[in-house]
Amino acid sequence: MIKPRNKSFFLIMLIFSALAPQARAADLSTAEIQTLADYYKKYVHVVTKPFYIYSWSPTASQYSTVTTASSPDAVKNAQAGIPAFWNNLNKKDKENVLGPGLYAASDPTYTRGFGKTDPALLQIRVDRGFRMLDFQSDDEAALEDAAANPTVWALLRKAHCRDLGAISSLFTNTCPVGTDMTCPKTAVPDSCVRVLKAVFNDNLEISGLAYSYGASTTNECGELSNTNKHDSSFVITKPEALTTENTKIFTRFTQDALNDRLRIQSQMHELDPPNGSPTVSKLPNAEPPNFFQSDLTGKPYDLNVSKWNKENLYACSTPPQYVSLKEYEASQAAVQDACKAPPTDNTQVNIQDLGKVVKKACDQTSNE
């Protein structure tokens, strides 16, 4: 007769099996994760001036009852797809540059073909404080720097990350630096995914990625070049980056936000003018030619759209709309230090680190 095991044995095994996944949350120690975070911090940018990005999808029919541009349902639907990025890096993906997720372009024209015959357009305002890992920040230099840094190199190898060093190559659903996007897509090893998430999502708290893709050339943004980042596209990695205040949806069912719709239609006209027509009409080479409601037809184009583009599209303004995370943290520390000292004008302290005047009511801060 086989004697039953002690009940405490099964309880211990149950507890162990429940805790095992947490123990494998990252294959590196907390100190090792911090080492990688400190190294890659220089490639993280913090937005200091808001800009707009655009995401097309063939899903307008899903919003047949949504007639307002600021729709909580549309925001929730967009947020629902964002976790797919981290959840699927360990799977092969042949359709997307960086695997599943919410992608957005730097203008409303370049990727409009993704709307196909049932287009819905998300307009997202990227607000101050948004942190993005910038693949265009000396990506090749990052590969060389990591190779010259034995500690970083060893930690990446320990985590089984491939194509060590270059930022884009860490996320190996994309192609190595210097190649086109026809290379075979491979899954990122589970151990590397856990480390990447611990470093970039949990430690550096990024909300998105920026990578070189393409954009419509505009007079305002200048000719695309190696130093012109207007050709960036974005992947949103944190659902909370989207709110009803900074996100709008436009479909053929949208009845409000007339000025927004007219401005977007005018942007398309500027970038792809239909024989110089001064009023909204069908656009050539577009799918579909005019996705907005017919209430725009015949209205004059927004003549101020060029000025709006320069002030609100990504990488069209000088100085840049972001600073490095290191600069941002230094400026925040400077604000805090200044507010601890007696204010010079009793109410405000001016700090220039972010490329603008940061105003702080120091007496209020001290009372918080």
Image: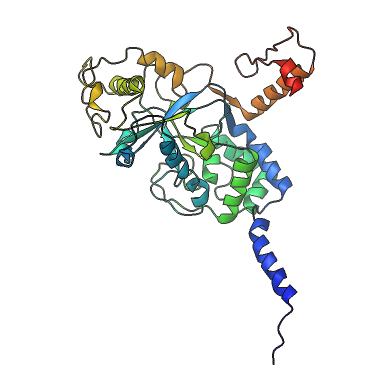
Q: Give the image location of residue 45, x and y in percent.
A: 58, 29
Residue at the bottom extreme, as displayed: 1
Does any portion of residue 4 appear in the rendered image? yes
- Colour mode? rainbow
Q: Residue at x 34, y 25 (%)?
A: 256
Corner quadrant of residue 312: top left
Above/below status of 12 relative to 338: below
Residue at the top extreme, as displayed: 345
Q: Give the image location of residue 15, x and y in percent.
A: 69, 65
Corner quadrant of residue 339: top right
Q: Residue at x 59, y 46 (%)?
A: 197
Does any portion of residue 135 appear in the rendered image? no
302 and 159: which one is in front?
Answer: 302
Is 109 on the left or on the right of 236, as rendered? left
* Number of numbered discs: 0
Quarter of the image that includes the N terminus: bottom right
Q: Give the image location of residue 215, x and y in percent.
A: 38, 29
Is 71 on the left or on the right of 87, as rendered? left
Q: Give the image location of residue 207, x and y in percent.
A: 55, 36
Corner quadrant of residue 257: top left
Q: Residue at x 46, y 44 (%)?
A: 80
Is 207 on the left or on the right of 108, as rendered? right
Quarter of the image that includes the C terminus: top right
